[in-house]
Image (spheres, rainbow, N blue to C red):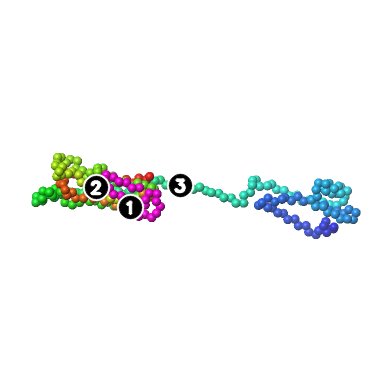
Amino acid sequence: MKKILTGAVAAIALVGIASPAAAQTNQRHYAGVILGIPYTSTNPGPFGVLANEALLGLGIGTRYTAVADAPSDSEAATPTVTTTFNLTGSVNKDCSFYAGNDANARNIDFGVIGVRTGNNENVNSAFEMVGPAFANIETLTAGCNFNNEVSIAKNNVNGLVNSAAGGYDTDEFQANIPYSVTANWTGVAVNTVTSGTGQSLAVSTSQQNNTIQQGAWRSNMTINFNAPAITNKGLVAGTYAGTTTLTLSAL
C-alpha cells in the first residue's frame, strides 16, 4: 500500500482535444486500511462516496480527485467547410464593320456606263450596254459577338434608277439597271458552336433584300455588285442611282 501512496515521481499529462468531443476528466479515488486489510475504491457511486467520506472523517484512508473542465465549442464543429464563390460579369452585344474613314468611302461611282453609240451599230443594238458594270468592296474587320442577323437591302427592286429619264419608248428603252449583291465572310450558323466556314448572302437582280442569321463571327468581308449588260433594250441617258444597305444586328 505504501507504494501507492508515496511513489517517487508523479507525472501528470495535460491533454486538450480540439476535434470530436471527448469526455472531460472527473476522477475520484479512495484507498485505506481497515483492520489490517487494504482497500481501494475508484469512482464510487453516491453511497460509496458517503461511506468513504465517513471513513475519512474517522481518520481512515485517503482520497484523490482530478476534475477538468473547459467550455465546449461555440457551435457545432465542421471538419470540412465548402464555400462556393459565384463570379459574374457581362459583355455587351456588339457588331462591327469597318467602312472607311468617311462617307466618301461608301460612294461607289461606276463612272460612265458605256452604251453602243456608234452610228454604224445595228438599230437593234443601238444604245445598249457595252458590258456589265461591277464593283468590289472588301473590309478586313466585320462581325458580331453574339447570335446575329446579316441583312442586305436595296432601296429599289429595279436596281439603279434614272429618276429624270423624261419620255421614252418602253418597247425599246428602259431607265433602270438591275444589279445583284453578294457578300462573303467566314462564320457559323446561328446557335451553332463549331469552326467557322465560308458564309454568303446574295440578293439577286430581281430581289430587293435578303437576310441570314449567324452565330458570333469575326472575319473579313467582301461585297460584290454586278449589273449584267442590258442587251435587249437601250438605256435612256441620264444619271442612274441606287443605295444598298448592309446591316449587322445582334439578336
Quarter in which the C terminus is drawn? top left
The region drawn magenta spans: 185-213
**Which structural element holds mark 2?**
loop
Q: What residue is disc 2 on? A: 205
> Is tag 2's residue or tag 3's residue first in the polypeptide sequence?
3
Q: Nearer the viewer, mark 3 or mark 1?
A: 1
Question: Relative to 9, does residue 229 appear above or below in the rendering?
Answer: above
Q: Separation of disc 1 and disc 2 at Cα? A: 20 Å
Q: Farthest residue in the right direction?
A: 35
Q: Which mark is residue 89?
A: 3
Mark 3 / mark 1, whichever is N-terminal: 3
Side of 27 where 249 appears, left or right: left
In this rendered view, identify the residue nearer to me: 26 or 133: 133
Q: Please say whether residue 125 is visible from this viewpoint.
A: yes
SS for dot 3: loop
Q: Amino acid at mark 1?
A: Gln
Check if mark 1's residue and mark 2's residue have beta carbons within 8 Å. Answer: no
Instruction: Identify residue type, mark 3.
Output: Gly
Report the side of 184 relative to 163 (left or right).
right
For numbered disc 1, what is the local secondary structure?
A: strand
Q: CA distance from mark 2 to mark 3?
A: 46 Å
